[in-house]
Image (cartoon, grey):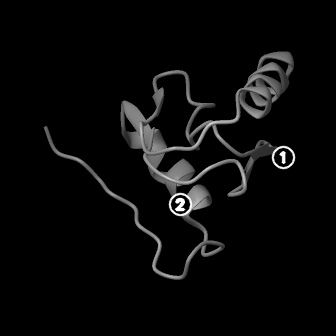
Amino acid sequence: MPATVIVGTQWGDEGKGRFTDLVASEVSMVVRYQGGHNAGHRIVVDGESFALQLVPSGVLYPHVTPVIGNGVVVDPRVLITEMDMLESR
């Protein structure tokens, strides 16, 4: 199975989340494999902004399965808050 891997080289803030969301339209699964909730991503869909911290970019595509890998530091409270925000919107 082919894979596309997006890796940052500037320790964050170089647009990995936005780029991931862009290519997510062409994939079936998006995996976040490192980091924690201190690394946020903001994506804009139809003019509406979504701030993501733990949930992988690409989650808003109905065909994408988002996966939080075992290398991610998860604060359960932050994850639940983020999931509730996504579900309410």
Q: Nearer the viewer, residue 20 or 36?
A: 36
Amino acid at circle 2: Phe
Residue pictured at 78% horizontal, 42% vertical: 46
Among the two numbered marks 1 and 2 on one chain, the one whose residue lies closer to the N terminus: 2
Q: Is residue 63 above or below residue 53?
A: above
Query: What crowding class fits label 2: few (fewer than 14 Cα within 10 Å), some (14-19), or many (20 or more)?
Result: some
Residue pictured at 83% horizontal, 27% vertical: 81
Residue pictured at 55% horizontal, 21% vertical: 62
Query: What crowding class fits label 1: few (fewer than 14 Cα within 10 Å), some (14-19), or many (20 or more)?
Result: few
Query: Marks 1 and 2: CB-CB under 8 Å?
Result: no
Q: Nearer the viewer, residue 70 or 68?
A: 70
Residue farthest bottom in this picture: 10
Q: Is residue 21 left or right of residue 70?
A: right
Q: CA distance from mark 1 to mark 2?
A: 15 Å
Q: Nearer the viewer, residue 65 or 84?
A: 84
Callout 1 secondary element? strand
Which image quadrant: the C terminus? Answer: top right
Residue 60, given in percent of the width and then of the height, sits at 63, 31
Q: How many marks?
A: 2
Amino acid at circle 1: Ser
Residue 65, given in percent of the width and then of the height, sits at 45, 24
Residue pictured at 56% horizontal, 40% vertical: 56
Q: Is residue 35 above or below residue 56?
A: below
Which residue is label 2 attached to?
A: 19
Which residue is label 1 attached to?
A: 49
Q: Is residue 1 left or right of residue 6?
A: left
